[in-house]
Amino acid sequence: MKAATLSWIIALSGLAAPHAASAQPSVELDTQMFVERVTTDVNGRSRRILASADKVAPGDQLIVIVHWRNAGNAPLRDQAVVRSLPRGMQIDPTDPTMQVSVDGGAHWGRMDQLWLPTPLGGTRRAVAADVTHIRWSLPQAVPPGHAGRLSYRATMR
């Protein structure tokens, strides 16, 4: 009998969870990705252009732009924009406002602060190829409807 009551409590708490989550402010995210190409103009000068990233190949330099907007009815406080990196993409982690994770988002920091275990029981410093997620903290008290954009560079491996 107690097991049946416990399962009902768990079931009801599961139903209540979406209502609590919907009451929190929300951040809408939209991502655009471009390939940076270097071409030569008629005068022989190099020109950088941004092209659609419909087709990417190993070695392509990418520029990723993340647009964010406070879609809630309350100001955002202590919020962050978190993006997972697609397989094969290696970021340039030099942006001082960006934090990275090398373990699926469990731990965050700058590249020089992160370490990974080695197969033989030691540790090694994390490198850009190890990054699984990136994160930026949003400005304090973002009013409803306000928006911004963040960007980062990456290379296709």
Image (cartoon, rainbow, N blue to C red):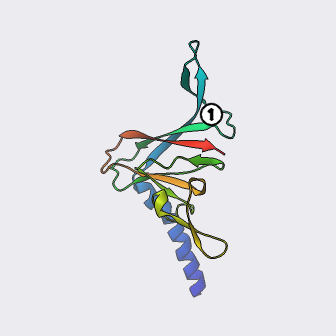
Q: Position of residue 73 (x, y in %)?
A: 35, 47
Q: Position of residue 55 (x, y in %)?
A: 68, 34
Residue 35, quarter of picture: top right
Residue drawn at 69 percent across, 37 percent down: 57
Q: Position of residue 103 (x, y in %)?
A: 57, 63
Q: Secondary structure at mark 1?
A: loop
Q: Please tell me which residue lies in front, 131 or 19.
A: 131
Q: Please tell me which residue lies in front, 123 or 4.
A: 123
Query: Is residue 145 toward the left or the right of residue 34 in the image?
Result: left
Answer above or below: position of 125 versus 154.
below
Q: Position of residue 89 (x, y in %)?
A: 62, 47
Please identify the residue farthest to the bottom as the structure is shown. Answer: 1
Residue drawn at 39 percent across, 39 percent down: 148
Give the residue type at disc 1. Ala
Badge 1: residue crowd in 10 Å (few <14, some 14–19, many ≥20): some
Residue, disc 1: 53
Query: Is residue 139 toward the left or the right of residue 108 in the image?
Result: left
Can you say which quadrant of the picture contains the N terminus?
Answer: bottom right
Residue 116, quarter of picture: bottom right
Query: Is residue 71 toward the left or the right of residue 3 in the image?
Result: left
